[in-house]
Image (cartoon, helix red, strand yellow):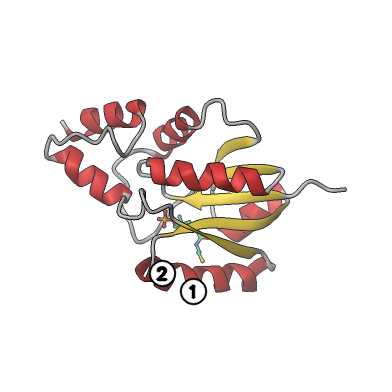
Amino acid sequence: MREKVAVVPGSFDPITLGHRDVIVRAAALFDRVVVGVAVNAAKRPLLPAAVRVELVENCLAGVTSVTVAQVPGLLAEFCREVGAVAIVKGLRGGHDLGQEEPMALVNKELTGIETVFLAAAPNWGHISSSLVKDVARHGGDVSAYVSPAVAQALATASR
Ligand code: PNS
């Protein structure tokens, strides 16, 4: 039987432990997961794409069946290229759903790819990359929300 591949896409600017939780849970549901570090046209990233990829790899070291790649263009096209059967995204409530639902529908219209939503675990539901960046920018401790390598990268980038 053909292996079932899922893509977990995002800006990952930077990856948080909330993202990590969703990726690990996706890896338990599918044979293989490709984390896609993509461009969100509505956001200006703090960290360059290559650094974001490295940090995702570092944060997921030791998690089998997960690989990381940069999404060069359209996410739906990337999913077709890697043979994905689904996109997986985490939802932190109604606000996320409002943003994610149109993207899920457009991706479905573009290539037929389905999106599966996983409810964010309660301990991560309040965490976002933006919030973490804001705390780090002002010298706060982000070690409860991100991996040590991400905390270090944020400290360097915020200097
Ligand atoms: O972590 P984010 O910023 O919520 O992720 C959004 C992202 C990067 C997955 C989305 O902007 C995206 O898919 N970008 C790639 C370009 C694309 O396919 N755009 C059309 C989306 S329907």
Residue 158, given in percent of the width and then of the height, sits at 18, 35
Residue 77, given in percent of the width and then of the height, sits at 63, 57
Mark drawn on residue 127: none
Amino acid carrying label 1: it is Pro
- Tag count: 2
Q: Residues within 10 Å of mark 1 (few under 14, many from 20)?
A: few
Q: Quadrant of residue 13?
A: top left
- Give the residue at mark 2: 99
Dot 2 and dot 1 residues touching (CB under 8 Å): yes
Relative horizontal placement of residue 158, taking residue 129 as reference (left or right): left
Amino acid carrying label 2: it is Gln
Who is closer to the viewer here, 40 or 21?
A: 21
Residue 51, given in percent of the width and then of the height, sits at 40, 32
Does 93 appear above or below 51?
A: below
Q: Residue at x 33, y 31 (%)?
A: 150
Q: Residue at x 28, y 43 (%)?
A: 46
Q: Is residue 36 visible?
A: no
Quick one: which residue is furthest to the front in this view? Answer: 122
CA gap, disc 2 to disc 1?
A: 6 Å
Quick one: which residue is furthest to the left in this view? Answer: 138
Residue 19, given in percent of the width and then of the height, sits at 44, 46
Mark drawn on residue 102: 1
Q: Could you say whether the residue bearing mark 2 is in a helix, strand or loop?
A: helix
Q: Could you say whether the residue bearing mark 1 is in a helix, strand or loop?
A: helix
Relative horizontal placement of residue 47, taking residue 64 as reference (left or right): left
Q: Give the quarter of the figure containing the C terminus.
A: top left
Who is closer to the viewer here, 1 or 112?
A: 1
Q: Is the residue marked 2 within 8 Å of ligand 1, measured from its CB? A: yes
Relative horizontal placement of residue 102, taking residue 133 as reference (left or right): right
Q: Is the residue marked 1 within 8 Å of ligand 1, measured from its CB? A: yes
